[in-house]
Image (tube, rainbow, N blue to C red):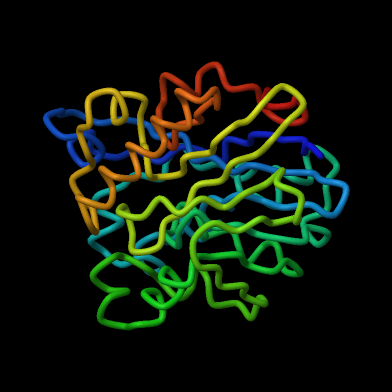
């Protein structure tokens, strides 16, 4: 079996380049990706972007420190996940699964807009998010993920549809339980790296972001992604503005 894979850019977030990759400076407009996976057994999203409140009152939602670090001026009224799905004639209420790479606000903030899905997260990510002290350290906000969705906690690799076409891959390090997603399409395997690999340069040069939960685990995850790439998988990098210039947008297939 194969699955159909579509990319959606859910706005852009302006950040400091030094926070994204060691040794750099200046600002960068980071694409905020979400992906739609359509399979004979159901429909899934990999990440959901930001909540619409980030456009109007990011400080109240995320706290003053986060709002000072990031700029939300490139997050428009049509950029939330519900609007992006509706623009391609997909009903947000008919999504079966949300696979969150992790629970940061730019990856899980749109979960609330996809009301009937089951969340699929790594067990250690869910545990960290529900530990107040650890959640504060890592930068998790309950407003992003606590909306009464059924939650499937997985431990390591997980076969979403049971046929090997969509596999959750543990790529820990950026957060305690970060996961990437491997999708088998008609044109071959694609790995959606999430924040395990912000930029192509992150992989090639092993220059990590400034804020990392576990550097050793993140470097090991980069090794795993590199092995997958050498085995023929195409990697889709999390927030690379140069890479995303050429990413086909839904309703065109990703590859």
Q: Quadrant of the N terminus?
A: top right
Left or right, 99 with respect to 253, comes to: left
Q: Which one is in front, 104 or 119?
A: 119
Left or right, 151 with respect to 50, comes to: right
Q: Which one is in front, 94 or 215?
A: 215
Q: Position of residue 152 (x, y in %)?
A: 62, 72
Q: Position of residue 218 (x, y in %)?
A: 28, 48
Q: Which one is in front, 199 or 106?
A: 199
117 over 146 or under it: above or below: above
| Residue shown at 40% from the left, 59% from the top | 58
| Residue shown at 75% from the left, 56% from the top | 162
| Residue shown at 36% from the left, 36% from the top | 198
Residue 48 shows in this picture: yes
Report the number of discs.
0
Left or right, 71 with respect to 95, comes to: left
157 over 210 or under it: above or below: below
Q: Quadrant of the C terminus?
A: top right
169 over 125 or under it: above or below: above
Residue 55 shows in this picture: no
Q: Position of residue 187 (x, y in %)?
A: 72, 22
């Amino acid at each position: 079996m194969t699955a159909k894979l579509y990319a959606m850019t859910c706005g852009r977030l302006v950040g400091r380049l030094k926070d994204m990759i060691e040794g750099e400076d200046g600002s960068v407009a980071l694409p905020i990706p979400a992906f739609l996976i359509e399979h004979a057994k159901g429909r899934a999203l990999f990440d959901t972007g930001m909540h619409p409140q980030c456009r109007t009152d990011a400080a109240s939602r995320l706290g003053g420190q986060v709002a000072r670090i990031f700029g939300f001026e490139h997050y428009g009224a049509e950029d939330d996940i519900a609007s992006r799905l509706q623009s391609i004639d997909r009903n947000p209420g008919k999504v079966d699964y949300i696979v969150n790479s992790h629970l940061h606000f730019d990856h899980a903030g749109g979960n609330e807009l996809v009301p009937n899905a089951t969340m699929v997260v790594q067990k250690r990510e869910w545990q960290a998010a529900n530990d107040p002290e650890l959640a504060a350290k890592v930068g998790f906000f309950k407003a992003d993920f606590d909306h009464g969705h059924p939650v499937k906690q997985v431990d390591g690799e997980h076969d979403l549809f049971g046929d090997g076409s969509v596999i959750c891959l543990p790529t820990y390090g950026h957060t305690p339980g970060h996961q990437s997603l491997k999708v088998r399409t008609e044109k071959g395997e694609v790995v959606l790296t999430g924040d395990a690999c912000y930029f192509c340069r992150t992989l090639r040069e092993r220059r990590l972001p400034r804020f990392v939960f576990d550097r050793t685990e993140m470097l090991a995850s980069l090794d795993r992604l590199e092995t997958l790439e050498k085995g023929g998988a195409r990697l889709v990098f999390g927030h690379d503005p140069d890479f995303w210039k050429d990413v086909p947008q839904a309703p065109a297939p990703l590859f």
